[in-house]
Structure formats: structure tokens, C-alpha cells
Amino acid sequence: MRDSAQSTTPAIKFHRGQFVLYRDPEMFWTGQAGHTFVCRVDRVCLGDTYDLVPLPSGSPIFFANPEYMRLLPSVDAMRDIDTAPLNPHGAADAMTAAAIAWLTQQDATTSRRPELPR
């Protein structure tokens, strides 16, 4: 008889340098606080496990099971910059400091006259 239960784990291969959300299964299932945190993938191991570095600091996690990891896409981290108004001076209250800095830099770059090649 086949088991009809399906895994809820997304089929994804993580790569070194990616940011992931990791849930420590032992801490989670025993009801301990602080069981879920952001990590950076440090190494891809044999057997489809990963070594993780908790951020901003913490003890390395060796041979993490990917079933307890979820990718943190860069598009989510950059959404405030990607959707910020084009005029950084008129809507500064609604933007983060990173978005304002990026827009100010873009404004300075685009308002400058291009230099002719020498």
C-alpha cells in the first residue's frame, strides 16, 4: 500500500551564499522559544544537507535538513527600493533609509552630464 501523504517541502536546491529561514526542529517540537531564524548557506554537504551560519551571529549549524529551510528571495529584501517613489524628497517618511540612499544615488548619477571618452 502506498503512502498518499505528500511532503509540503518545496523541491529546491540551496546554494552557498543564499539567505534562508531555518527552523530548528528540536527546539520547535519541544516548544522552545527562538526556534526560527535567518541564516546564510555556508556549505552544501553530501546527502542533501547544508551548513548554515545564523545571522547576525551564532553557532554554526551543521548538516541542516532542507525540509526545515525556506529561501529568502532577494526580491523581498529589495521590494521597498523597487517600489519606492521616483522623487525621494517628497515621500521620505514612507521609505527606509536604504531606499532613500539608493534613490539619492540614482538621482545624482542620472542628473550628471556624461563625460566624453578621452
Image (cartoon, rainbow, N blue to C red):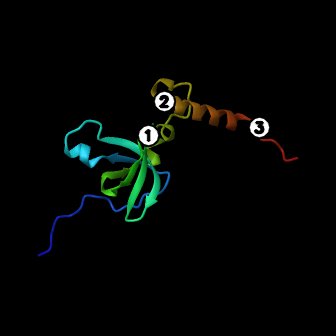
- Give the percent coordinates (x, y) of residue 21: 36, 46
Of all residues, the one furthest to the left in this rendering is 1
Q: Is residue 5 left or right of residue 14?
A: left
Which residue is labeled 3 in the image? 113
Snapshot quadrant of residue 10: bottom left
Snapshot quadrant of residue 113: top right
Q: Amino acid at mark 3?
A: Arg
Which tag, 2 or 3, sits closer to the chain's start? Answer: 2
Q: Do the numbered discs 2 and 3 sit on residues whose CB atoms are within 8 Å?
A: no
Residue for point 47% across, 23% down = 93
Foreground label between 1 and 2: 1
Q: Amino acid at mark 2?
A: Thr
Q: Do the numbered discs 1 and 3 sit on residues whose CB atoms are within 8 Å?
A: no
Q: Secondary structure at mark 3?
A: loop
CA separation in Å, label 1 and label 3: 41 Å
Give residue 55's mark. Answer: 1
Q: Is residue 62 left or right of residue 27?
A: right
Of all residues, the one furthest to the right in this rendering is 118
Residue for point 31% across, 42% down = 36
Which residue is labeled 2 in the image? 96
Residue for point 48% across, 39% down = 83
Q: Secondary structure at mark 2?
A: loop
Tell which of 101 and 63 is nearer to you. Answer: 63
Foreground label between 2 and 3: 2
Which tag, 1 or 2, sits closer to the chain's start? Answer: 1
